[in-house]
Amino acid sequence: MIELFTVVGLGLTLMLPLANPLTSMTLLLSLGRHIPLQERNRQINQAAIYVVMIMLVTYFAGQWVMHSFGISIPGLRIAGGLIVAFIGFTMLFPTQDTNDMPEAEANADALAQRKAVNIAFVPLALPGTAGPGTIAFIISATATMQSDAVHYSTLTLILAPIIVFLLLGVLFWVCLRSANSINKFLGEGGVQAIARVMGFLLVCMGIQFVINGILEIITQHGAPVI
């Protein structure tokens, strides 16, 4: 039992900086500000489930999936980095608000009935919280734990990741559900300012993921790194 709690605590300590639910909360404030409250809460519930499922599938089948499709960790980092950078650009340079468009005012009833865009899976769950860094870390940690399996019981190897991922999912859900209170406190201008700052940081993170992936490829092929 002590071994299980130790592994769970270590897993949370290592996963929290990578998962960082605050990033998804900022994405929700920026991209979901026009989604009705009831629909937004429904998508938050979906996103929390998606986060847990992505992590569980990555832990138990991630290596098999990547080997089956010939995907390497550097490739995962580069692809994920491009997605993160794209989302960052959309936050830095948002499209014109429908409230400022005469066409939207003339068709207010039609716009109100339009189905809200679902952002639960992309970008809230992936790559907002279960991003390329999180996925790459889980896959790497899985290989390490399996190689050191002699130090851990089978029960710990099965239960510890499930508990860690469930706790992260609950924390993710709490952060997103509290986004409405933060939105009321900061106001529209404050949310937009934070969204642009986070957008810039996401662009930087995405580019860094791409750089790390390229450097890993260079290192694996034995080429000198300048």
Image (cartoon, rainbow, N blue to C red):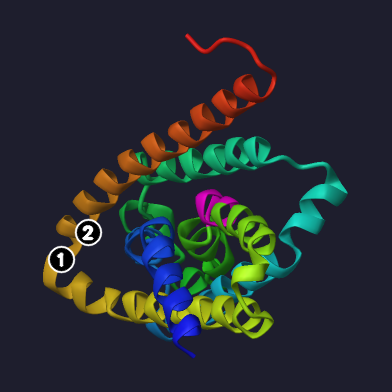
> Residue at position x 59%, y 35% from top?
78
Nearest the camera: 138 or 207? 138
Instruction: Classify residue 165 as left or right of residue 158.
Output: left
Q: Amino acid at mark 1?
A: Gly
Q: Residue 58 got which mark?
A: none
- In terms of image quadrants, where is residue 222? top right
Q: Residue 191 got which mark?
A: 2
- In terms of image quadrants, where is residue 46? bottom right
> Residue at position x 41%, y 61% from top?
14
Q: How many marks?
A: 2
Tell me if label 2 and label 1 are in contact, CB under 8 Å. Answer: yes
Q: Amino acid at mark 2?
A: Val
Count residues near mark 1 (Cα–Cα under 10 Å), then give few for <14, some for 14-19, many for 20+: few
The spot of residue 74 in percent (x, y) is 63, 35
Distance (Cα) linking label 2 and label 1 = 6 Å
Q: Residue 187 got which mark?
A: 1
Residue interval drawn in magenta: 131-136
The spot of residue 201 in percent (x, y) is 32, 41
Main SS, magenta residues:
helix
Nearest the camera: 92 or 60? 60
Is residue 212 in sight in this rendering?
yes
